[in-house]
Amino acid sequence: MRRFSSALVVTLAALLGGCASTCCGSCSSPDAQAVVEAIAKANPDCTRLTVHCTPAGAAGPIACASTAPAKKGKPSDPEDVKAMATGQTVVLEEGDALDVTVPIRAKDGKFLSACGVTLKTAGMSRDQVVAKATSIAKDVEAKIGDCCTEGACCADGACCAK
């Protein structure tokens, strides 16, 4: 019996350990953090780019990928939560920039994630900045696929496909 129990413990440990690295370590699509960094780099007027999602069992959404290291893994700001709750784009002024939070992909009528895009406003109207930020958010959404959009965000901020 003791041998059976030891074998069971070893098997469970291997299975759970495999799940942790498979489920929370990476996506079947590109890593959300790499996507965020690449898209921000391609858009020099983007001062911050963040993807928000809600980990299973969490109290609320967190920043699961961001060009601002201090934001990653931290609770989402009220405007990010509002975009996810209402499905509406939220725009805030931040000095010489606009912070535009765009809800990402609905599932069963609920938005499970959002993309916050902060852009410099120099030379653009408010409508132009919002349109560009929305385009950037849609680019992020297209590149991360199901990563962070199907409730597949882990407590440590890593995103993964279910």
Image (tube, helix red, strand yellow):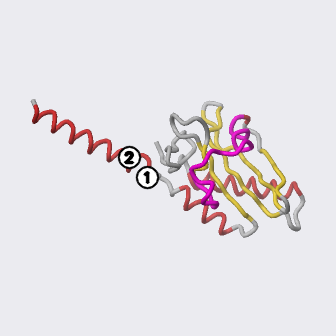
How many numbered markers are drawn? 2
Q: Earlier in the sequence, mark 1 or mark 2?
A: 2
Does residue 96 lie above or below 27 as drawn?
A: below
Asked whether the beta carbons under mark 1 and mark 2 sit within 8 Å of each other, the answer is: yes
User: Badge 2 local density, few (<14 within 10 Å), some, or many (20+)?
Assistant: few
Does residue 152 lie above or below 133 as drawn?
A: above
Return the mark for residue 138. none
Q: Position of residue 20 (x, y in %)?
A: 38, 46
**Residue at the spot 47% in from the left edge and 52% down from the top edge:** 27
3D distance between C-alphas at marks 1 and 2:
7 Å
Image check: 154 left or right of 63?
Answer: left
Q: Position of residue 50 (x, y in %)?
A: 65, 54
Q: Position of residue 100 (x, y in %)?
A: 77, 51
| Residue nearest the observer in this picture, 19 or 147 | 19
Image check: 56 left or right of 40?
Answer: left
The residue beneath circle 1 is 25
**Residue at the spot 60% in from the left edge and 48% down from the top edge:** 74
Q: Position of residue 135 (x, y in %)?
A: 73, 56
Magenta stretch: includes residue 80: yes
**Residue at the spot 50% in from the left edge and 44% down from the top edge:** 155
Magenta stretch: includes residue 72: yes
Image check: 126 left or right of 46?
Answer: right
Residue type pointed to by label 2: Ala
Q: Which residues are magenta?
A: 65-85
Q: Disc 2 on helix, strand or loop? A: helix
Return the mark for residue 20. 2
Q: Disc 1 on helix, strand or loop? A: helix
User: Badge 1 local density, few (<14 within 10 Å), some, or many (20+)?
Assistant: some
Q: Quadrant of the N terminus?
A: top left
**Residue at the spot 87% in from the left edge and 54% down from the top edge:** 127
Residue type pointed to by label 1: Gly
